[in-house]
Amino acid sequence: MMLAMLCLQTYAGNERAAADSRAALAATAAVDTSPAATQPATAPTAPVAAPVAAPAATVTVVANRDEWVLDRAGRGERNTFVAGSLDPARGYLFQVEFVRQGAAINTVKLANIFTTDDDKRAWKSVSPDHAAYMAKVNASGGKLKGHYSLLNPVGKFLPYATQRIIVAVKGSKATPATIPLNTIKWKHEATRSMTQPAEGVEVSFVATLYRDRNHATPSVPADYKPGLKITKTYTVAKQDYSLKMRLKVENLSKTPLVAYIDQLGPAGVPLEELYRGSDDRYALYGKKKAEGEDVEVTFKLHAELQKGKTPEDKPVALGRSDDADPVLWVGHSNKFFASMVYLEPVVADRLAAPTWEADFYFLSEPESSTSNVHVPAIRIGGKRVKGDAFRHIPDLSLPTGGKAKEMVFDIFAGPKKRDMLSNASAKYSKPLYQRLNYLGSINFQSCFCAINSLTLGMMWLLQGISGLAFGNYGIAIMMLVLMVRLVLHPLTKKSQISMMNMQKLGPEMEKLKKKYADDKEALQRETMKFYKTQGAGPILGCLPMLLQMPIWLSLWGSLNAVVELRHAAFLPIWITDLAAPDAIISWSNPIVVPLIGGMTGPIHSFNLLPLLLTVAMFLQAKLNPQMSQPATTKTKEQETQQKMMRYMMPAMMLLFFYNAASGLTLYIMTSTFAGVIEQLVIRRHIEAKQAAEAATTTTVKIPGKAPRDSRPKKPKGPTYFKKG
């Protein structure tokens, strides 16, 4: 004879008050004396502080007792379990720490990627001795942060926790029971090594639920029997940025059940952009287009989601797995890293998983007093009720006889490397990444005019050049500048000649303006005709800049998204992180400059590179030929405008690029200085050519009068009139 104690505090959503009142009860269950009774090895107990069991001779019947209780077997076990390794020599790409609460992931730390530039240099100084590096971290007093932690707890959410299960007897009109699974500690079932299909580790957790078979008859004592078993298994493999998560639900009772499960996605992706005070993180999801197999990626920036002040208890709906254009995966990302979760279909050759009828949505969670984060989640086995997008009726059918339904999730957690996500033959790549268009998780929205295909091409080109530069991306950026300049040199030279010709044509243009001052159409027509005869034109002078604009914008987008630039050094002392400003002197309290603080953002350091860029822009503006009228005919207003352009443009560049990534600033500065040198060379070449032509030209004065047409006309007297 075994005594089963009940009164589990259940999570009941909008019935919170009722749940709280039930939690205050200290009730007892009846003793099941039937020989056929199958009781749990450890009786299900209530989560109250001190449940009181009824004496053996007395049975207390509680009318509002809970229908489902949780087996608390496993109480007293340790709470954390680790799979993988941070030592790159072990072959794992990350280390995962699991916790029993919600059978969730506590952290995912990347083995080959470090939190700060100082960490990376500390690792290089002792590599490959990982123990020596960790000793340095522990002895640094917090200066060294260790390996990069991609997933972390945020508020009440743990990454990939199973939130709850809602279950009911099939065909019953009774209100389904809501059992929280994210607040209880699951039983750790096993941690075992594996060799197939790849070498790695499996970690399993179990939650067992017992159902009161007499719940419909309150006057009869409770009779708890095994009802549901939920098994959650994670698989961590070597040389893989993905891990598998299997969620299996078994019906252990003799009654058909229906249920649905809320499963959390990735959470706690850290803020990567530390220098501009902006939040570079975003939630994202992939949808398969109604026709074909193409997957479209949609971004939801934190700032965009917060515009509507999303309440914590109101999910942001994204779509379903059984729509015409189904949602395939959801994720959370910052500039360089991401974690995406994909619900695999029952039919292997399909991308979508319509069988599960899953809803995808974002949950809002306060991260601080001023901002929220939005955590992706999936509700599996639910159908929408018309008129209410967030109320569901259970419909994950669980037949009797121990038959199980198993949902398989593929979880990606790693850097967003272009080649890994787009090339099946690249290191650590998987064909699934291409099918799901994980490459689309690279966000080029920071550069509003960037063309994605051209930007990806620039990323490919930059990575290829880095191989010629012995892996130094700073040298690769300068080599890229040289390549672009060489390709555009013929056009640049022609542009300079045109601009110099335009400068010389100033007096003639003034004559045309005076002659056709009252006829704008004639002035425009004669001006274009004049440009054509002289082989000059303002469009030709601007053409090199117009052609370079798509290149600059694409480079801007690529340099802001290339994870290889993170902690990549150009020089040993200066510009040690091409993905961050070149902070020569840093300070802890940021400075916000009045009026212009919105352009620069908070200033955390003295950055030299943007100042050099400003000097280069000023020199270029000063060298550019002026295409206006001669100084003798300029108005004071026109002179003031030209001076403002000469000084304002470099000043604006300083504001825009002060906190920009040093890799981007290095490219623009190098390109500008190269343009200044190119202008000087072209100008000297043109001037030397003109001087040589002038030296070889001989002027011969012919005796006698010049032709009538070339002689100036004599002035007419006041009494002159032309005869008709």
Image: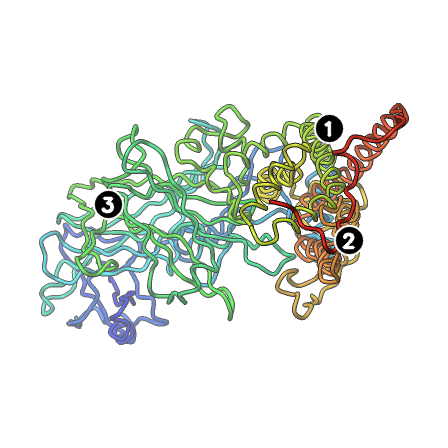
- Using the image, determine if residue 209 lies above or below residue 112: below
Give the CA separation, mark 2 to mark 3.
57 Å
* Residue drawn at 17 percent across, 56 percent down: 168
Q: Amino acid at mark 2?
A: Leu
Do the numbered discs 2 and 1 sit on residues whose CB atoms are within 8 Å? no
Q: Amino acid at mark 1?
A: Phe
The residue identified by callout 1 is 470
Give the CA separation, mark 2 to mark 1.
28 Å
Q: Residues within 10 Å of mark 1 (few under 14, many from 20)?
A: few
Near-viewer residue (314 or 454): 454
From the viewer's perspective, tell me whether residue 316 is left or right of residue 495: left
Which mark sits nearer the N-terminus, 2 or 1? 1
Name the front one of labels 2 and 3: 2
Q: Which mark is residue 611?
A: 2
- Using the image, determine if residue 96 lies above or below residue 3: above
Badge 1 marks a residue whose secondary structure is loop
From the viewer's perspective, tell me whether residue 630 is left or right of residue 439: right
Badge 2 marks a residue whose secondary structure is helix
Q: How many marks?
A: 3
